[in-house]
Every structure is written in C-alpha cells, then in structure tokens.
C-alpha cells in the first residue's frame, strides 16, 4: 500500500470507528437516499466518511474545486460493497481511501481502469 493510501486509510478507519461507537445514539429508522428505510446511524456514518474523504482530498490537493469532491453516490457505492463483510469497517475505509488517492472516481465510486 502506498504511503498516502496507508495514511489516508488509517485516518478514515479511525473516523469510521469513532462513528460506529455512536450507533446507539441513532437507533431509529429513517428514509435512506434510495427510498428504503435504514437505521439513522447508517446515514450518519456515510456523512462522516464523505466529510473525511473530502477533507483528505483537499489536504492532498486532489480536490481543487467543488466538482472534484466525493459525492454521496460514490460513498454509498463503496459502503454497499463493504456491507455484510466481517471486515466492514476495513473495507469501507479502504474503499474511501481509494477515492481520496485517485483509484476510484469521486463522482461514482467506480474503480478507475
């Protein structure tokens, strides 16, 4: 793992772990962005990760305008790929690190070829 990717991954993983410790504060069900009902903590964790991803992108100068920032769609795609895995936190954080470091498109979350 490249130095930037490792540092970003570790920072994002810490942020996500901190967010997961607050799940009990958001137990209610709410409408998700796709129209399905989800626990409120799911949306909170996506929000935390999008904020952290965009902060890292600005820090690394990968985002120089608003159109360069990661979208909710990109974060949702990475999160959905991690859903159901034993190592959900690791997969979600790593996928977000791939957005920051340019391996994934910040608009869609798709891997770049």
Image: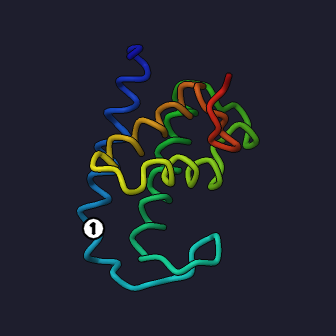
72 versus 104 height, above or below: below
Is residue 32 shown left or right of residue 19?
right
The residue drawn where x is 27% and y is 54% is 18
x%, y% of residue 105?
67, 34
Q: Where is the N terminus found, in terms of image quarters?
A: top left
The residue lying toward the viewer, choosing from 110 and 17, is: 110
Is residue 21 shown left or right of residue 36?
left
Count all numbered tags in the image, as a single digit. 1
The residue lying toward the viewer, choosing from 77 and 62, is: 77
The residue drawn where x is 46% and y is 45% is 52
Quarter of image, res 72: bottom right
Q: Where is the C terminus found, in terms of image quarters?
A: top right
Quarter of image, res 109: top right
The residue drawn where x is 42% and y is 77% is 39
Element type where label 1 sits in the image: loop
Colouring chosen for the image of the structure: rainbow
The residue drawn where x is 71% and y is 37% is 68
x%, y% of residue 37?
52, 81
x%, y% of residue 16?
34, 51
x%, y% of residue 46?
48, 58
| Residue density around tag 1, few if under 14, some if 14–19, many if 20 or more, within 10 Å | few
Q: Which residue is mark 1?
A: 22
82 versus 7 height, above or below: below
45 versus 23 height, above or below: above
């Amino acid at each position: 793992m490249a130095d930037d990717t490792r540092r970003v991954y570790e920072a994002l993983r810490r942020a996500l772990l901190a967010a997961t410790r607050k799940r009990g504060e958001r137990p209610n069900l709410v409408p998700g962005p796709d129209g399905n009902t989800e626990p409120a903590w799911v949306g909170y964790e996506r929000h935390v990760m999008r904020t952290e991803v965009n902060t890292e992108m600005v820090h690394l100068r990968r985002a120089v305008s608003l159109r360069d920032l990661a979208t909710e769609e990109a974060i949702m795609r990475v999160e959905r790929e991690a859903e159901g895995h034993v190592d959900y936190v690791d997969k979600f954080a790593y996928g977000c690190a791939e957005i920051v470091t340019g391996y994934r498109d910040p608009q869609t979350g798709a891997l770049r070829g």
